[in-house]
Image (cartoon, grey):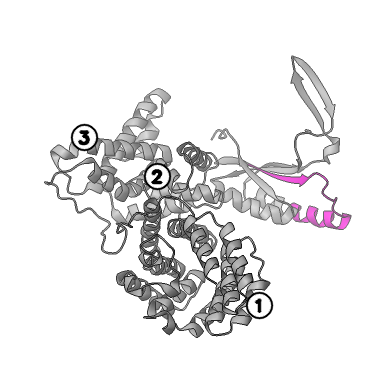
């Protein structure tokens, strides 16, 4: 297993550019600028021209131009502005060329008033607008994820394909189909009004959290790419939190991701084995991420408009507070799970609540709760049941349950972990 | 403005609703139709007779073949539809939400290919 690289999207990273205009500049530097800035540029051009393909192509061309010119001319004072302006000019050129053919010159002029200054707050609204388009409920969730990573995250199609264990062709087709539907069915580019926002925000947050978990849980695949996905999700989470400062669940999701991410290094040992929360070396937890996450959780508590992400973040914050597993405030965690259940009554939440019950000493009651749940296809249901059976001394049943769990996951590290557990009960 | 087809389907073998239910649905759809006309979004709409009244005509090897019954490959049959005008999909979906409540069945929203002349 490769040693995780410190992510570029973690705290301390500024969204702007820190490239020194006079320094040596190579393609990697520009690729980095692309990752950081193409999302903004694409979003702005989509607003301006109302067409995703035109926007993407023009931004791509602007970066090609940058690769050619920046090494000689140096990085311009505002690289992001340069990219947007260059891309906009390219798009206007293209539309004018087409307009000559199609006699739509007037239209091209109207679409792109020349030399309009690029204002950053408009640009950010553009990204939010495009995010709501990418996560429109009329698109399926795979399409939502792919579009978000491509258009907002600035990932290449090949990168998204690798991260989701699918071929580049499949991913490209998925993106083409989604963009076609946006265009032909006219999915609008707009930020939903207050009355629609509760319905429309859900898919946006779900997509970001799905991207995060795909990178964190690593259902399979290359560790490094996976970690990039989590970093990208956190970057998106920060962006949303900045753009929608009044949405408590946006803050809750960001806090949840930061607090979860803080334990990434500790959840795998040097041999690549999974280390569960209770056994983790807490000195390896990332204190900066914890501090940032807990600060957001405190702000959420002060605001007192709770929701599922905020409750989960709060639970994570309680874990982060405990210097050792033994000092965890389980009654507090139980109380939070009870509240989480009132807003999100799912079997997975009940499963996690059962773990908290067991930790307060009531193992039999916890097992009863677990066995009531209809989660037999979920490997963690078996793992949890196995753990509880083991604590009750029902060794044979515990072993069988660990093995049943191992059968149900494709993640090799998880399989190894559960098989080892089975051997030790 | 774009035009969208909002179509209502019923699945093969689905039970025929009772007279009472049908009457309620008709009344609800009448209210919806009035609303969509008042809003200026109405282009056309109507309910269809049951699929067993359908006839399929197709051209095969430059011969026209006529067969009794609905298009045999389809598991679901169209029961009625609206053609509406809307600025974008969100507007069309908003009408579809009201339509599905009125007709008590799922509604498919599909954009038309050609934009109507302004």
Residue B63 forms part of the magenta stretch: no
Question: What SS does tag 3 mark?
Answer: helix
Which mark's residue is nearer the viewer, 3 or 2?
2
Residue at the image point whose x is 48% and y is 50% from the top: A145
**2 or 1: tag closer to the N-terminus:** 2
Give the x, y percent position of residue A304.
46, 79
How far is disc 3 from disc 1 in space, using C-alphas?
Answer: 66 Å
10 Å crowding of disc 1: few (<14), some (14-19), many (20+): few
Instruction: Name the residue nearer the viewer: A44 or A285.
Output: A285
Residue at 26% across, 60% down: A13
C-alpha gap between disc 2 and disc 1: 44 Å
Q: Nearer the viewer, mark 3 or mark 1?
A: 1
Q: Is residue B36 above or below residue A370?
A: above
Residue A68: which numbered mark, if any?
Answer: 3
Magenta-colored span: B5-30
- Please give left or right for residue A19 compared with residue B49 in the image: left
**Percent position of residue A228, x then y:** 37, 54
Residue A368's label in the rendered image is 1
Q: Say which mark, if any, is on residue A159.
A: 2
Task: Give yes or no for residue B10 being in the magenta stretch.
Answer: yes
């Amino acid at each position: 297993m490769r040693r995780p690289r410190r992510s570029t999207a973690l705290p301390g990273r500024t969204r702007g550019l820190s490239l020194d205009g006079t320094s040596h500049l190579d393609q990697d530097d520009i690729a980095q600028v692309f990752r950081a800035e193409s999302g903004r540029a694409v979003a702005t051009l989509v607003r301006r021209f109302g067409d995703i393909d035109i926007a993407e192509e023009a931004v791509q061309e602007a970066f090609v131009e940058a690769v050619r010119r920046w090494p000689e001319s140096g990085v311009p004072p505002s690289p992001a502005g340069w990219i947007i302006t260059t891309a906009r000019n390219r798009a206007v050129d293209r539309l004018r060329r087409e307009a000559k053919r199609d006699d739509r010159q007037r239209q091209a002029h109207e679409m792109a008033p020349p030399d309009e200054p690029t204002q950053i707050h408009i640009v950010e609204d553009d990204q939010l607008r495009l995010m709501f388009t990418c996560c429109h409920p009329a698109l399926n969730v795979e399409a939502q994820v792919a579009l978000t990573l491509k258009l907002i995250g600035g990932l290449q199609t090949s990168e998204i394909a690798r991260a989701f264990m699918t071929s580049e062709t499949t991913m490209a087709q998925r993106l083409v189909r989604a963009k076609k539907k946006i265009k032909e069915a006219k999915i609008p580019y707009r930020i939903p009004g207050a009355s629609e926002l509760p319905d429309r925000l859900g898919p946006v947050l779900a997509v970001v959290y799905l991207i995060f978990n795909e990178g964190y849980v690593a259902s399979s695949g290359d560790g490094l790419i996976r970690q990039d996905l989590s970093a990208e999700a956190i970057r998106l989470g920060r962006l949303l939190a900045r753009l929608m400062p009044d949405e408590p669940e946006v803050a809750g999701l960001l806090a949840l991701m930061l607090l979860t991410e803080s334990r990434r290094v500790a959840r795998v040992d040097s041999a690549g084995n999974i280390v569960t929360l209770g056994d983790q070396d807490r000195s390896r937890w990332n204190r900066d991420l914890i501090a940032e996450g807990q600060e957001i959780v405190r702000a959420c508590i002060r605001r007192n408009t709770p929701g599922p992400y905020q409750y989960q973040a709060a639970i994570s914050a309680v874990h982060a507070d405990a210097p050792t597993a033994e000092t965890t405030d389980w009654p507090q965690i139980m109380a939070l799970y009870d509240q989480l259940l009132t807003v999100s009554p799912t079997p997975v939440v009940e499963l996690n609540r059962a773990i908290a019950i067991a930790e307060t000493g009531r193992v039999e009651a916890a097992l009863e709760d677990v066995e009531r749940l209809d989660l037999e296809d979920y490997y963690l249901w078996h793992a949890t049941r196995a753990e509880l059976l083991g604590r009750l001394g029902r060794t044979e049943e515990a072993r069988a349950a660990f093995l049943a769990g191992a059968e149900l996951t494709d993640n090799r590290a998880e399989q190894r972990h559960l098989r080892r557990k089975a051997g030790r009960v | 403005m774009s035009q969208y087809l909002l179509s209502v389907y019923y699945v093969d073998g689905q039970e025929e609703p009772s007279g009472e239910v049908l009457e309620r649905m008709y009344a609800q759809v009448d209210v919806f139709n009035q609303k969509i006309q008042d809003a200026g979004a109405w282009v056309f709409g109507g309910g269809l007779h049951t699929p067993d009244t359908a006839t399929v005509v197709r051209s095969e090897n430059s011969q026209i073949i006529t067969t009794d019954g609905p298009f045999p490959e389809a598991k679901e049959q169209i029961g009625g539809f609206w053609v509406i005008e809307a600025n974008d999909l969100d507007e069309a979906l908003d009408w579809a939400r009201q339509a599905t409540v009125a007709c008590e069945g799922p509604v498919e929203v599909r954009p038309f290919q050609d934009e109507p002349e302004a």
